[in-house]
Amino acid sequence: MKISELSRRSGVSVATIKYYLREDVLPAGEPTSSNQASYGDGHLRRLRLIRALIDIGGLSLARVRDALAATENDELPLHDAFGAVMLGLDDPGMTVADDDTVGEVRDWLADRNWTIAPDAPATRRLAELIGILRTFGLPVTAESFSAAADTAEATAIDEVRYAHDQPDRIASVEMMLIGTVVYERAMAMVRRLALEAASARIDDGTGIDDPARG
Amino acid sequence: MKISELSRRSGVSVATIKYYLREDVLPAGEPTSSNQASYGDGHLRRLRLIRALIDIGGLSLARVRDALAATENDELPLHDAFGAVMLGLDDPGMTVADDDTVGEVRDWLADRNWTIAPDAPATRRLAELIGILRTFGLPVTAESFSAAADTAEATAIDEVRYAHDQPDRIASVEMMLIGTVVYERAMAMVRRLALEAASARIDDGTGIDDPARG
């Protein structure tokens, strides 16, 4: 398809598409003349992915490029590509976790028999978030996330296999990204709805909390 | 405490604290002279909250102000304050959910007996995310989130009650914000770790996926 059709079908303006081409987050099309190129379904899928990473995941274009870097190395085993995706998604400047809490999270992961790379950013990040919750007086430990971990574990194998089963490596990495960024946002919305429903049960509009209800 | 001590204890620079005071997201201190004021633990807590909303939640200062607006109305029942917090946390420009999918999410919430305000942004947002997952060929329905909803429901009552049990209304609203933004980020990290562990089980580093394993 021409760039105008790619724009129409993706909802991304031609100017923005050209910007993504220059910034190397969207692969070049097949040249059809000296100043035109043809684009395929892979370009459409990639554009939707870039928009999801920016709009839903809140990533900058530089971090989109980092997260997509794993699509470019055909030699990388998929599990390593997955690790690269997770590194790319992380915001490296923000982790201020203390070593004790990182150790607590690592011990919890080991107890679950989860094989996690030593440099996996999510480990330090979870420790950091536990630390923040504690500064607000919340009685949180790594163990507090065990029920959430059980739920995540129950679907993770199917999700990763679905990514593996894509027709090519680029589609596999793209599916890992979508599965991570869009699903985690959806889970956050489910949590917000659960909190609102709980709030409605506890507080019936009088503003008086009755501990016997709920 | 003086502004210098508030800065030291919160890790937020004096210039940034003054900016937050001007922007009305941090309440003024108690004046001690014509150009000095004294700040309390409430200011420290508020500063930590603002930083968490910006650094963890990715909110702009304008959206922090929206999310904090519910702390300012003493007459608002806590459940309504909770709704205001959820409205403030939402990014209003982005929802492109189609009506069928919104209806599907509403039916699913009704089946769960969750009481959700008709204008709750998380309903449309979840529908939007389901739509995005479907454009990538993922066989997702509202029902797909039932296990996550069960997990969220199991802890939501305790979380909301913990917010209610704070010593004053401002602390209650602040706790709702922290509970929402920081916990949902922590859940996302738990999901990333679960995906990495699943990826390690499926792909042992050879890059060859063996469906008999896992």
Image (spheres, coloured by chain):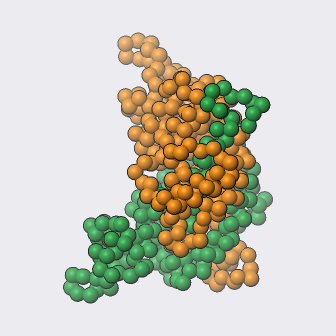
Chain colours: A orange, B green
| Quadrant location of the C terminus of chain A in the rendered image | bottom right
Question: Residue A76 appears in which quarter of the rendering?
Answer: top right
Can you give x and y, in whole percent of width and height, for residue A155 in the image? 71, 45
Question: Residue A200 appears in which quarter of the rendering?
Answer: bottom right
Can you give x and y, in whole percent of width and height, for residue A154 in the image? 73, 48
The residue at the far bottom in this view is B32
The residue at the far left in this view is B34
Is residue A132 visible in this depiction of the protein? yes
> Which of the two residues, A212 or A129, is positioned nearer the viewer here?
A129
A55 versus B19 height, above or below: above
Residue drawn at 46 percent across, 72 percent down: B69
Can you give x and y, in whole percent of width and height, for residue B72 in the image? 46, 78
> Which of the two residues, A208 or A160, is positioned nearer the viewer here?
A160
Residue drawn at 37 percent across, 16 percent down: A35
Is residue B134 visible in this depiction of the protein? no
- In the displayed structure, does residue A51 sit left or right of residue B14? right
> Which of the two residues, B48 or A76, is positioned nearer the viewer here?
A76
> Which of the two residues, A123 or B54, is positioned nearer the viewer here?
A123
Residue drawn at 56 percent across, 80 percent down: B166
- Counting the numbered discs, the total is 0
Can you give x and y, in whole percent of width and height, for residue B36 in the image? 24, 82
Residue drawn at 48 percent across, 58 percent down: A99
